[in-house]
Image (cartoon, rainbow, N blue to C red):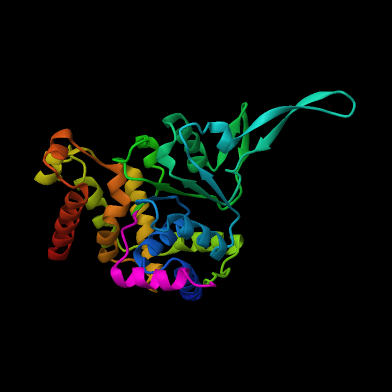
Amino acid sequence: MDDIRDLVTEIEALVGKLADARASITKRFIGQERVVDLVLSAILCGGHGLLIGLPGLGKTRLVDTLSTVLGLDGARVQFTPDLMPADILGSEVLETGADGSRAFKFLEGPIFCQLLMADEINRASPRTQSALLQAMQEKSVTIAGQPHPLPAPFHVLATQNPIEQEGTYPLPEAQLDRFLVQIDVPYPTRDTEREILIATTGVAEEQSHRVFAPAELIAAQTLVRRMPVGEGVMEQILDLVRACRPDDETAPEAVRDSVAWGPGPRAAQSLMLTVRARALLDGRLAPSAEDVAALAAPVLSHRMALSFAARARGVALSGVIGEVAERVTRVEAAA
């Protein structure tokens, strides 16, 4: 009983700090509350986020603000077609000492930070994109056979232009799966755009303030994993992920007809974590079925692919996921 009371007390304290962090972020990144919540959810789960949207929607501004508010050492890499893996990871150079001896010395690249912004990640070649794979999964990089651990916590927030734009390369499926969530950044509403004009074109702009320290953020990530998840919510997560696989017996006709390949177990793990983070951001002690439905598209859309025939018919993957989520929720409610 004492353990439960302690957990509730810790969650309530964290909810207050998260509210302060959100307020500080939205001073500079105006009107995109869902985007902010999804990014915070990814970081609270210890994961990485993929921000997709056209240039000029504030993605870079958001990541810069997060670095300040969360107290993280941030770095930014602008991905270009000529960017090489060593430009991100670092490289070894031959150094001559005062006594004439020579030895290799490792010079750290910009990835040795706590919050890496990979700007326009899909403008770099697949070879360079894949340089992030080990870092995102293992939180370390290997150079010349030697492992080099990255600072803790370590997060990648990558921005991506729509694939249809010229000069872009689709991200490899293995790398896409390393992103906890895919976050679509839409155009702001008219009222929000008016607020942006007023807030950013004057003599002075609102500034964000630091709310977390790295150690506090790591403690928050541990607390998220301690939050309880009800059996019903867990079953809904399993039903949803499995129903999105075209070869599964529970897959509905929409999935069988339109999906080439579906999400793996990492998608279920990601949902299990992010529903907790969403509940926490909402001030609740445990996730609900509503959290699963709300996070279905951000967690699953980059872990699935439409068949060629479905793309030719103009099928939207978000629509397929929404249909499956609604079906699973309806079945769970009836049960």
Q: Quadrant of residue 217?
A: bottom right
Question: In this rendering, would 58 be left or right of 240?
Answer: right
Please check the rendered image and state whether residue 333 is part of the magenta-colored stretch, yes or no. Answer: no
Question: In this rendering, would 164 be left or right of 283?
Answer: left
Q: Residue visible at 48% across and 41% down?
A: 137
Question: In this rendering, would 216 be left or right of 201?
Answer: right
Question: In this rendering, would 77 be left or right of 192?
Answer: right
Q: Is residue 4 in view from this perspective?
A: no
Residue 90: x and y in percent read 62, 35
Please check the rendered image and state whether residue 188 is part of the magenta-colored stretch, yes or no. Answer: yes
Q: Residue visible at 54% across and 50% down?
A: 154
Residue nearer the viewer, 193 or 323? 193
Q: Residue furthest right?
A: 99
Residue 325: x and y in percent read 20, 56
Residue 34: x and y in percent read 34, 64
Query: Where are the magenta residues, as a range?
Result: 184-204
